[in-house]
Amino acid sequence: MTSTAPSPPPPCLLIVEDDPAILELLEEELQDAGYATLGAGSAEEALATLSHSEVALVVSDVRLPGISGMQLLEQLRGDGSEVGFIVITAFGTIDQAVEALKIGADDFLTKPLELEGVREAVFRVLENRRLIERFRQHVPGDDFHGIIGNSEPMQALFRDAARLAKSDAPILILGESGTGKELLARAIHAESPRAEAPFLAVNCASIPAELMESEFFGHRKGAFTGANDHRQGLFQAAHGGSLFLDEIGEMSPNLQAKLLRALQERTVKAVGAEQEEPVDVRIIAATHRDLEQEIDSGNFRSDLFFRLETFSLRISPLRERPGDIERLLAALIAKHAAAQEKCIERVEPAALAALLDYPYPGNVRELENAVMRAVTLAEAGVLSHADLPERLRHYREAPRRQTGGETGNALALGQSAGSWPSLEEVEKRYIQKVLDATGGNKRRTADILGIARRTLYRRLEEE
Ligand SMILES: Nc1ncnc2c1ncn2[C@@H]1O[C@H](COP(=O)(O)OP(=O)(O)OP(=O)(O)O)[C@@H](O)[C@H]1O
Ligand SMILES: [Mg+2]
């Protein structure tokens, strides 16, 4: 046995196109992008091929001799086939494209075809299918108590968190807003020997300064006006368990001193009490602030900081681990679809593109809100681009991602890095490539290039 796993075979695409020149051009282009391809000159031929081959995606022209591309799609969906399907429609037949989407196409392309557009559409549809497959199967990733993140920084974080969870040391969680600090605090508790005891969370920003001490440590009857009874504080209530102090940067310096004492002595004193009482509580604190800066400006005690900082965990912002977005999407779509009792069958390629491209200043919370909104608005099982928040939709007007793991040479013109041809040169070579592919047919070439025949003649004369 060797230790290297064989790499999976490339996805197989079936191109259905009656014009042999275009068929060949498309096959070549997609093979260059790393796919395996099969060709069919008619829908009938395509059906025969599909009956005995493992095809991931069909790219089919609508206008074909005999059965049309639309009928092919209809028949496949009627038979329960879930194969990916991209239709190629003529320019200006947008209703046809819409009709195709309604009967189950994943995407459409309009003629004249732009090769880069074809690659992108194929890449996205396959990505999308993979994503859907994932949330269908609920593929468990290497999650940590519901925290999703397969990226290296998250995996390292999970390892550190699991190790720290075993001890009783206080932990400081750092991270921008919406990165999952509270989620991590709960995970640490769940992973710790205290898992069966209470986990209490308090947001330091939400308690008025004058009530905080009594809130934390409790008070004796008559300790102050309104203290009509003995009351236990959060430390006593969390005895044996964990206490999560969220937004610790907002805690008053006076209380910071008392917290430090509680950490060092493992005792607390209720307001109005004579005696300290022992408490057994694990402190997990969190902040999105830069505490060192808070120390400099006199808002945070350095002794408490050093005590907490010994075991700190930093959660990376989502933009630094874009590889996590896909699994988060799959999980969040599944989560919100289930919560709303909806079935999401498909994510529009444009929606997927926008969701994967956006840098998420609001981190996972922003991603989750966008997904929740889109799931709520989704109709007919489709999560669509139009239902995404505006800032996501407009982040990139025309999302252009690298396709098929290639390095930008979408036209496969054969230049090497370092000797980039001029735009004019690229254009000339591209025209020649299409001309060759169409057997010198100038009308087809002009169609494919999306330019008027007159323009093509002019370009050719210029050479
Ligand atoms: N890695 C993740 N996997 C799954 N869900 C996540 C992840 N990170 C965050 N979330 C979700 O995002 C939302 C925000 O997370 P959380 O409240 O823990 O963030 P936070 O860092 O405490 O934010 P803030 O600083 O604004 O309080 C929650 O709904 C949480 O479930
Ligand atoms: Mg929080």
Image (cartoon, grey):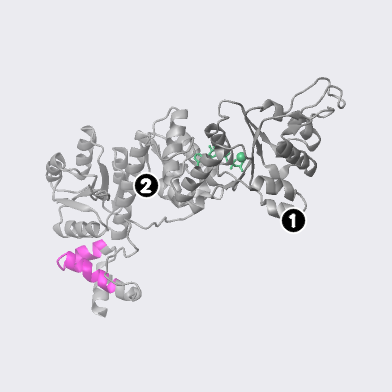
Decide if residue 399 is in sight here. Answer: yes
* Element marked by disc 2: helix
- Chain part drawn in magenta: 427-448
Which quadrant holds residue 44?
top left
Q: Is residue 446 magenta?
A: yes
Q: Quadrant of the C terminus?
A: bottom left
Report which residue position mark 2 lands on: 349
Q: Residue at x 54, y 32 (%)?
A: 190
Pick the residue in front: 14 or 440.
Answer: 14
Question: Left or right: where does residue 435 sit relative to residue 289?
Answer: left
Report which residue position mark 1 lands on: 296
Q: Residue 99: percent from the left, percent from the top?
A: 30, 41
User: Which is more N-terminal, label 1 or label 2?
Assistant: 1
- From the viewer's perspective, is residue 398 above or below residue 455? above
Pick the residue in front: 130 or 255.
Answer: 255
Q: Is residue 54 magenta?
A: no
Question: Left or right: where does residue 190 sit relative to residue 50?
Answer: right
Mark 1 neighbour density, 10 Å: few (under 14) some (14–19) many (20 or more): few
Q: Is mark 2 within 8 Å of ligand 1?
A: no
Name the residue type under label 1. Asp
